Image: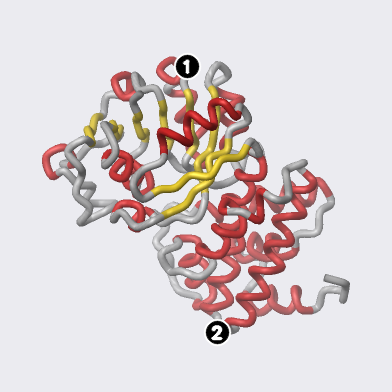
Amino acid sequence: MSISVLGAGAFGTALAISLANTGPVTLWARNLGNMANARKNTNRLPGCIFPDALHVTDNMNKACQADILLIAVPMQKLRGFLIENASDLSGKKLVACCKGIELSSGAGPVKVIEDTATSATPAILTGPSFAADIARGLPTALTLACADDDVGQYLQQYLTSQNIRIYRTTDTIGAELGGALKNVIAIACGTAIGAGLGESARAALMTRGYAEMQRLAAHLNADPTTLSGLSGFGDLTLTCTSEQSRNYRLGLSLGKNTKFDPSTTVEGAATAHAVNTLAKKADLDMPITAAVAGLLDNTLNVSDAMQLLLARPLKEE
């Protein structure tokens, strides 16, 4: 059994480091830079030395000889990556390691794989995790979602490492939605803290944001218990409370009205617009998501967004 990680961003690199402490792993990068010689990813995970069992390459065909392929590219680039490398990925077990909803289609990672790599077996690895924690060997629990439970058990066994414990589900839709929607709520929470609205406001946004996550999940026939697990509630808790989260940091900058590095990948930004579009089409009430979308496209300011949320009709919880 062999594993390759396709994509050498922070999360892909961290997974490769952790798994290579258990057995041989190949990490594919479009641009290797000095990773092979330096034995670390200086740009994304400085200070985290590669284990001896981690091999790095820029040869896609070679990397795709592995039995399990973890695809760690940004959500909005996933479809293009799959199309570009279709022949190498054909028939493989493909595990998406990105979180979000595709802006152009409203699809999650598993659906994108199903659409573009029709002979592959798709799965998703998601849950509360920061790349730096995984790379440093700190304990982390994740959800592995695969509709084929036999394949899911296989993946669960071989993707568990010394510091990563994996739980399994067949509910790919619920796992996708948890990982995607928590990023939108994290932007809202960061905005509240950045604007000085306080911890109580953050708690309210997390709780009512979780209700929005459940609402969309029910509409898309996901299992509601999935969102109470690692891929939903767990990831929501982590992402809404730590400045290690890029989504939360984007929210902080919105709340403080300061500039944010445009080169930083923030999956929740595109997801907010994609989910807001989905909610409107389905006539679903998702006011926090709508407010985040408005903040991002500058049709709302923080004060207006807060007033709109507070002025909503009173209702039962």
Whether 231 is drawn above or below 251: the answer is above
Residue under label 1, please give it: 90
Looking at the image, which residue is at 37% across and 33% down? Answer: 6
Name the colouring of the figure: secondary structure
Residue 101 relative to residue 253: left or right: right
Residue 84 relative to residue 137: left or right: right
Residue 56 relative to residue 260: left or right: left
Residue 212 relative to residue 70: left or right: right
Looking at the image, which residue is at 27% across and 39% down? Answer: 20
Give how far across and how far down residue 23 sits, in percent.
28, 34
Looking at the image, which residue is at 63% across and 63% down? Answer: 292
Residue under label 2, please give it: 196
Whether 69 is drawn above or below 307: the answer is above
Whether 257 is drawn above or below 297: the answer is below
Q: CA distance from mark 1 to mark 2?
A: 50 Å
The 10 Å Cα crowd at callout 2, few under 14, some 14 to 19, many 20 or more, is: few
The 10 Å Cα crowd at callout 1, few under 14, some 14 to 19, many 20 or more, is: some
Give how far across and how far down residue 255 sits, in percent.
54, 75
Amino acid on which disc 2 is placed: Gly
Eye-nearest disc, 1 or 2: 1
Which element type, helix, strand or loop, lies under badge 1? loop
